Each structure stands twice: as structure tokens, then as C-alpha cells.
Image: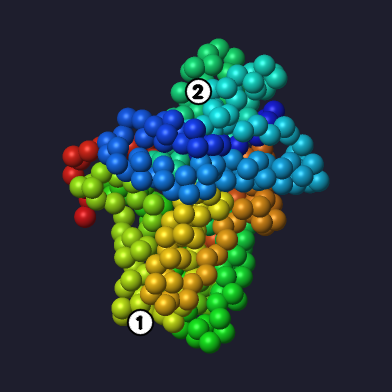
Amino acid sequence: MNYDAILVVSFGGPESREDVIPFLETVLRGKNIPRERLLTVADHYYHFEGKSPINQQTRDLMAALKTELERNGPSLPIYLGNRNWHPLLPDTLRKMKQDGIGRALGFVTSAYSSYSGCRQYREDIARAQSEVGPGAPAVDKLRAFFNHPGFIEATVERVQDALLAIPADARQTVQIVYTAHSIPLSMAHTSDYVRQLQEVQRLVSGALGQTNHVLVYQSRSGAPGQPWLEPDILDYLRRVKAENLGSAVVLAPISFLSDHMEVLYDLDVEAHQLCDSLGLPMTRAKTVGVHPKFIGMIRELIVERMNPESERRGLGMLGPRADVCAEDCCPPPQPGRPQPN
């Protein structure tokens, strides 16, 4: 199929202190999140003067992808539309319509399958198309890529660099602590999110020859009584020290593509401070960011979608995800719905 452009769809983030509260209110609209939690998260942004690094990191990714496509093709214009902050998706789709873009491929900055990481982005695109009205560009989302060789190989190199940064006398029993964004259990039970994370954990540790590793969660934001994926990263680090599970830890944020606020604050500030207080040596692996293998992977996803006969690559037991999600894939969580065992 022919496409006229690439649309990068990201989360977005505030650019100043004045943006923080309006941004968080946009993120949390329609959700039962206590105001106190919003203000707590706002303090995380104020710690960095209110400016999220995600916007520049997304622009850096787009620049690297532009260079990759100019070098190896296909040469397509790249647009950015955010879910929660400027440039917002409706504004971007209006610009694309004005530029004569009829059909675009959408690259969502989320590697995994879940309601918030996949279907919700598709709903956001559909809502923006409805707002733009007749002539809004069609957008076909690229598939989930958690086990694509380019993503796995880039992650392996990032974790390897962090392992080498651990002091030599603490490396013998170092533990890799893979971290992922926690989501409500009601959402986890209706998607392959945990299964996919466990597969990435297995593939990366296998490539590194590491057997001491664990998957934990961070950045929970729900109401206090709502069950979310656990264990929490801070609780687990206390356990590492108390039970002597490792002489040091490498924190590897595998569910994030860039070193944005939740990585910088939750790991580089909170987790780092805790490890210092525990006397537990710690390093943090970088996210894939603009790693050349990851950027090459994005191009491969574009090429495979434009050429239906091309090979779809996916490592491990789960194989490559389908180009088009099933109609019942990753439904929104329903409060009160009985959950499977």
C-alpha cells in the first residue's frame, strides 16, 4: 500500500512550570485519580523546572528517523501529534490535511500491547480524525514491536553498558531489575502486557548470559484502593537489601523508549536515593532512545507495512504481532468486571 507520510504519536509533556497542572489535568481527564496524586506528580515535574524531556527526545527520534529514511528510503515526511500536549493530534491532522496527506503510517511510542499503550492511541487518532472532519488523513498504526530484533538488540546493549558501570567488586552477584510502567490489574488481565514484558526480560537476560534478574513495576498513579501490577520498584529494592538478593542492581526500564520524566524521577531520583540510603550499588540502563538499531527497526516496520510480502521479524515464543489488531484486542478496563484467575 502507498503512504504519504509518517505520523509519530507520542504522550507529550509540559514545557514550563505553567504547563504542568493543565498538562496533568489533560492526562487524567475522566479518570478517578485523587487531586493529591496529581499534585504529587506535579512536584516531580517541578523538580526539573516543569519541563518534560519527552518532547525533545521525540524530536530527536524524528530527526534520526528522517536521516535513516533519507539514507535508505522510503523518503516520507514525518509529523508529530501528541495525546496530551502540543502539538496535539487534531492540530497535526489538520496540518497534514492542508499539506495534502491522504494516508499515513502511525508510529506510536509504545512497544507493548495494552489498552493505554495501544488501543487508547488508536482511539485518540480516531477522535482527532472525527474532529478534523471530512478529508482527515487515514492513519494505519504500525504493529507492537516489543520482541523485534532491533528493539531487543538495542536494549541488550543499553543493559550491558549499565552492567559494566557497576563497580568490579560488586558485579559477581549483580541483579538486573527490569522495570515497567504499572497498570491496573483490570487492564493487565485484558492484554498480553505482562507476558510481553516477561518475554523481553527473558530475551535480554539470555543474550547477556544473566540468570539473576526480576521484573518489577513503577510509576503507579491509580486510586489507593485500585489494584495495580506489583511489586513496586522501591519496595523491591528494600527486599534486595534485606534478603541479600544481589550485591548491586542494574535498573533497566524496558517499557519506556526514552529517558523521560518517569524514568528520570522515579529511577534516577527516588530509586537512586533509596539505594544510596541502603548502601546498595546501583546503575540505570539507558532506554533505547535513538540507538541506531532501534531507529533501523522503525524503518523496517515501515517497509514491511508498505510491502505485505516482506518478512515480519519477532524473536522468542510470541512471534511478530499482527499488522492490524483484533477487534477485541486490549479492551478498556471495566470497573467491577470479574477478573480471570
Q: Label 2: how many residues lie within 10 Å, few (<14), some (14-19) or many (20+)?
A: many
Indicate left or right for 266 with 171 as reference: left
Query: At 50% from the left edge and 83% from the top edge, which residue is drawn?
Result: 170
Q: Quadrant of the C terminus?
A: bottom left
Amino acid at pointer 1: Asn
The residue beneath circle 2 is 128
Tell me: residue 150, above or below residue 62.
below
**Residue placed under numbered mark 1 in the picture:** 244
**Location of residue 203 with respect to 229 vertically, above or below:** below
The residue positioned 48% from the left and 18% from the top of the image is 130
Numbered badge on residue 266: none
The percent coordinates of residue 242 (x first, y second) are 31, 78
Quarter of the image with the N terminus is: top right
Give the x, y percent position of residue 337: 20, 40
> Of residues 260 and 9, which is closer to you in this image?
260
Quadrant of residue 238 in the image? bottom left
Residue 52: give x, y in percent of width and height. Answer: 54, 43
Query: Mark 2 is on which residue type?
Result: Ala
